[in-house]
């Protein structure tokens, strides 16, 4: 499986609201977009490389907003992928809209696609249904944005919550499967992969973020920290949509070899 969180190309001098303060949305040079043609070319190149490495029955998940997701969807189709779902991540704790001139941004999208239109993919339907209180899981996921407990080693400016990645990994892989993240950042995908008993390869060109990744991975060597992460994920139940007394995540993590 591949999970990709590519640049959204939002670093254009705008402002947002974070932790009670007005902040600049600029993330770094890697998030500055060029022309529409340049962005299309960038997306086409990395999606082509990912397709070469993906197994024939493998799937790819790609996160984005309206700034980049439509380009990515078009190129996926162009390259021969089959789009399976477009997940809407509805954040339960979005930042407020400080301009008050349009609706508050509270969602991101995650495209799920397989390599070939006619080669079957893996979907762990029964586990997803169990996580969702015995009901079929929908393509709208109500989960919080990143919490303080996920920033113990430093923070990446576009860091994704472990709960999102854990759900993605459990939905579409088996234990010991390989997972690739070509835009690894601070390696949330890697942390979730380790917690779920999968193998991980991440690619990251920024040394600062790679350093954060290393420190986060070292944390998992501590049995108490590992259990803390599991407890946090079980508390979220990975499904705020569901009302259930049973917690299949606790049972799942109890089976893992650490």
Image: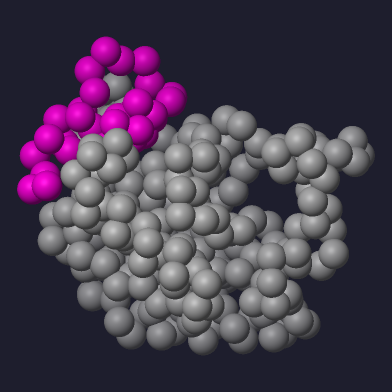
Q: 51 above or below 26?
A: below
Q: Position of residue 45 (x, y in %)?
A: 51, 86
Task: State the extent of the magenta-drawn residues as a range.
Answer: 230-258
Q: 202 above or below 91?
A: below
Quadrant of the image occupied by residue 55? bottom left
Q: In this view, does 72 lie to the left or right of 191?
A: right
14 or 33: nearer the eye? 14
Q: Where is residue 248 in the image (x, y as percent from the top left)?
A: 20, 28
The color scheme shown is one colour
Q: Is residue 5 left or right of residue 228?
A: right
Magenta-drawn stretch contains 255 = yes
Q: 105 above or below 86?
A: above
Magenta-drawn stretch contains 40 = no
256 or 153: nearer the eye? 153
Residue at 50% across, 78% down: 207
Q: In this view, does 15 lie to the left or right of 62?
A: right
Q: 124 above or below 233?
A: below
Q: In this view, does 191 lie to the left or right of 36?
A: left
């Amino acid at each position: 499986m591949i999970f990709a969180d590519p640049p959204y190309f939002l670093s254009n001098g705008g402002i947002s609201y974070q932790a009670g303060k007005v902040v600049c949305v600029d993330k770094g040079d890697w998030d500055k977009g060029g022309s529409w043609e340049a962005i299309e070319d960038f997306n086409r190149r990395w999606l082509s490389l990912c397709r070469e490495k993906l197994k024939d029955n493998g799937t790819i998940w790609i996160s984005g907003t309206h700034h980049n997701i439509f380009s990515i969807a078009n190129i996926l189709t162009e390259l021969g992928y089959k789009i399976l779902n477009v997940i809407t991540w509805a954040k339960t704790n979005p930042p407020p809209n400080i301009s008050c001139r349009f609706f508050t941004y509270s969602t991101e999208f995650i495209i799920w696609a397989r390599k070939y239109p006619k080669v079957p993919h893996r979907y762990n339907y029964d586990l997803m249904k169990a996580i969702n209180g015995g009901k079929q899981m929908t393509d709208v996921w109500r989960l919080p944005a990143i919490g303080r407990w996920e920033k113990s080693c430093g923070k990446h400016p576009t860091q994704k919550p472990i709960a999102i990645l854990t759900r993605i990994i459990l939905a579409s892989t088996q234990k010991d499967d390989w997972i690739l993240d070509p835009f690894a950042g601070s390696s949330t995908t890697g942390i979730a992969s380790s917690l779920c008993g999968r193998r991980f390869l991440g690619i990251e060109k920024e040394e600062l973020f790679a350093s954060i990744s290393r420190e986060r991975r070292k944390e998992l060597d501590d049995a108490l920290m590992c259990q803390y992460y599991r407890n946090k994920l079980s508390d979220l139940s990975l499904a705020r949509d569901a009302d259930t007394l049973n917690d299949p995540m606790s049972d799942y993590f109890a089976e893992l070899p650490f």
